[in-house]
Image (tube, rainbow, N blue to C red):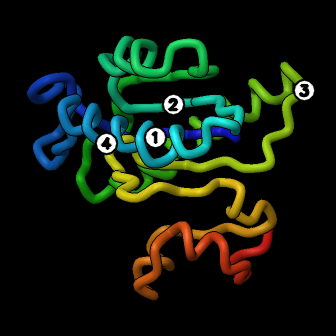
Amino acid sequence: MALVFFGKFSHGGRSKEMIPSDNASFALIERTHAAFRRNLLAPNAHVHVDVFAHSWNREAAPWFEEAYGAVLRGSRHEPPLFTDPTLKARSQALSIARAAALMREFGASRHVNYTLALALRTDAVVSAPVALHQMPTDTVTFAHWCCKHRRPLRACAADGVVRGVL
């Protein structure tokens, strides 16, 4: 499985590279990544995980290296390209694309074919254990679909309902 992180956050207080409307800090990221380890990685210890990360913050590189060590297979951290708050969606889409490119490049160089890739904002919280073996590999399930239908993600993934065919 590939765990693909994307987004922008600051180190300690506010990063020099952040605009006023940005608000994720390393303290928040440390709490959310503790939840990733507790609710995603620990319940799926039998699953091989490779981690890829992109952020709009050069200060994030050492944090990811320390947090994920040997399973961090690709990491790219650069200054923000878009500082206009109205372009946040464009910034997010580009960050996802760059993190996914790291995954594809690593997979091609090592002949790895990922059957499951989870793209998550670095500040997202996985609040309950997720059983990855129940996640369908031929569909795309967005967390907001589960929330809209008031279903826990683990139940959502297990029901087999196709919500987007790959």
Q: Which residue is mark 1?
A: 6
Circles 3 and 2: CB distance less than 8 Å? no
Q: Nearer the viewer, residue 6 or 71?
A: 71
Whole-Å distance between the Cαs marked 3 and 4?
Answer: 31 Å
| Among the two numbered marks 3 and 4 on one chain, the one whose residue lies closer to the N terminus | 4
- Give x and y (percent) for residue 140: 67, 67
Secondary structure beneath dot 3 equals loop
| Among the two numbered marks 3 and 1 on one chain, the one whose residue lies closer to the N terminus | 1
Q: Residues within 10 Å of mark 4 (few under 14, many from 20)?
A: some
Q: Which residue is mark 4?
A: 32
Q: Nearer the viewer, mark 3 or mark 1?
A: 3
Q: Name the residue type under label 1.
A: Phe
Q: Which residue is mark 2?
A: 53
Q: Which residue is mark 3?
A: 111
Q: Quadrant of the C terminus?
A: bottom right
Secondary structure beneath dot 2 equals strand
Whole-Å distance between the Cαs marked 3 and 2?
Answer: 20 Å
| Among the two numbered marks 4 and 2 on one chain, the one whose residue lies closer to the N terminus | 4
- Give x and y (percent) for residue 19: 17, 39
